[in-house]
Amino acid sequence: MGSLFEPDERPRLVVHIVDALDAALTETSLLNLIRHLPPERYRHTIVCMHDRGGRQGDVREHGVEVVNLHKRSGRDPLHYLRMFGVLRALRPDLIHTRDGAGLPAQVIAALAGVKLRVHAEHRRGAAHAGGGVGTRLLRRLLCPLVDHYIAASSDLEEWLVESVGAAPARVSQIANGVDSVQFHPRLGPAAAVGPPGFMHDGVFVVGSVGRMDAAGNHTSLVEAFLRLIASPHPAHQRLRLLLVGDGPARTECQALLHRAGAASRAWLAGARADVPQLLRAMDLFVLPAAAEDRSNAILQAMATGLPVVASAVGSNTELVHPGFTGILVPPMSTELLAAAIADYCRIPDMAARHGARARSQVIARHSMPAMARDYLAVYDALTGGEAPGSGRRGC
């Protein structure tokens, strides 16, 4: 019996090059995108520069091939030779890279003969889109190699056009999507998560999810929490703090809580696989990031039906509507952050109203099918609407 598809009818192959599949948000977002694209039109392979992370098996279980380049820590130029060999063997119709770590792969893909190349920008942290003079120059030099850019926010879209030099017609803004089935409001009382005594009737749990580093600015959230529980207002005695994630700032946050004698009222849960359940234990989601936006975390919180207090940076300003779904505060302002948290703690009805509106906003504007349709339009325009051998548009 012959193959299900004739050689010229086989679904087109998209190769996604990522740094690693060890970040749950990145892995989940990519896997969800693949799940929602029509398999009769596109098949997928994920090429990982680093093979760390324990969830590659989950990806393979969904029929997605994963190829590891086994890049060593530090400088490892030989992994580019391995990437070249992999791309020559796979012969993809289209390559899709992400953020600063994926830029060199655009060069390797061009050398390997991959005709169609897409690059997506999801963050503008210092380690990604910001960078130094050398990074900015590299982005401009590589601009002619990229057929189409995808920006996760209007802020990133503007940056790609004005700073990187991409032609506006070659940039599409596609907001991140969220699985509103997996991330849903709690259906009854909050689960008894955390150490003994952390949860009990009547508590108001303030939570955050994300890597605990300088960009995440979780120390400001801890300081705001300590300021509130030290005040005489009776509502503040209900407060609990739940931080999900790991990183270099976790130790400092724990030390701040211990010195204040508040360790029993906070749970620093570390990196967890049960983020949906932990979000449902929260009453308010806070993203205090100083510079880098992490909109996936906000979208997941909103889908869970939580109001959001966030720093007014990056795409946070597009997702959080002040007075409707949450409150925006200036970055690094502990006093205003504490005031915003206090408003929700003192007025539970406002938290419920804003949380319900937040979920409605996610379902209307940030569903996974909507995101997949937008990506599909980009892929189709490149692979079907324009001949692969046509001239490349200028930057």
Image (tube, rainbow, N blue to C red):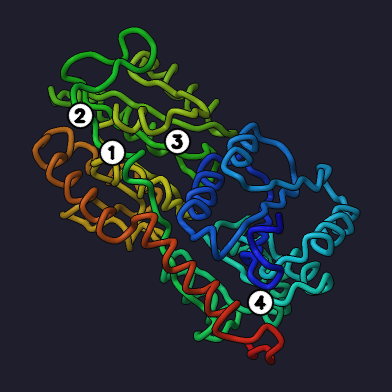
- The mark closer to the camera, 4 or 2, is 2
Residue named by callout 1: 184
Instruction: State the residue position of label 2.
Output: 187
**Label 2, label 1: how many angstroms apart (C-alpha)?**
9 Å
State how far apart marks 4 and 2 are (Cα). 46 Å
Front-lying residue, 386 or 133: 386
- What's under tag 1, amino acid-wise? His
Alpha carbon distance from label 1 to label 3: 28 Å
In the rendered view, does 376 fall on the left or right side of 332? right
Report the amino acid beneath label 4: Val
**Image location (x, y in percent) of residue 292:** 49, 54
Asked whether disc 2 touches disc 1, contact meaning CB atoms under 8 Å apart, the reply is yes
Residue at image position (49%, 60%) is 38
CB contact under 8 Å: marks 1 and 3 = no
In space, the residues marked 4 and 1 are separated at their CA atoms by: 37 Å
Crowd tier of the residue under label 4, counting other residues whose Cα lies within 10 Å: few below 14, some 14–19, many 20 or above: many
Please tell me which of labels 4 and 1 falls first in the chain.
4
| Local secondary structure at mark 4 | loop
Badge 1, how many Cα within 10 Å: few under 14, some, many 20+?
many
- SS label for mark 1: loop
Tag 3 residue: 219
How many marks the image carries: the answer is: 4
Q: Nearer the viewer, mark 3 or mark 2?
A: 2
Q: The C terminus is located in which quarter? A: bottom right
- The residue at 28%/40% (across/down) is 304
Residue identifier under label 4: 146
| Nearer to us: label 3 or label 4 | 4
Q: Is 222 rendered above or below residue 111?
A: above
Residue 35 location, x and y as percent?
A: 49, 51
Q: Distance between the residues labelled 3 and 4?
A: 39 Å
Most extreme residue toward the top, as rendered?
196
Q: Earlier in the sequence, mark 3 or mark 4?
A: 4
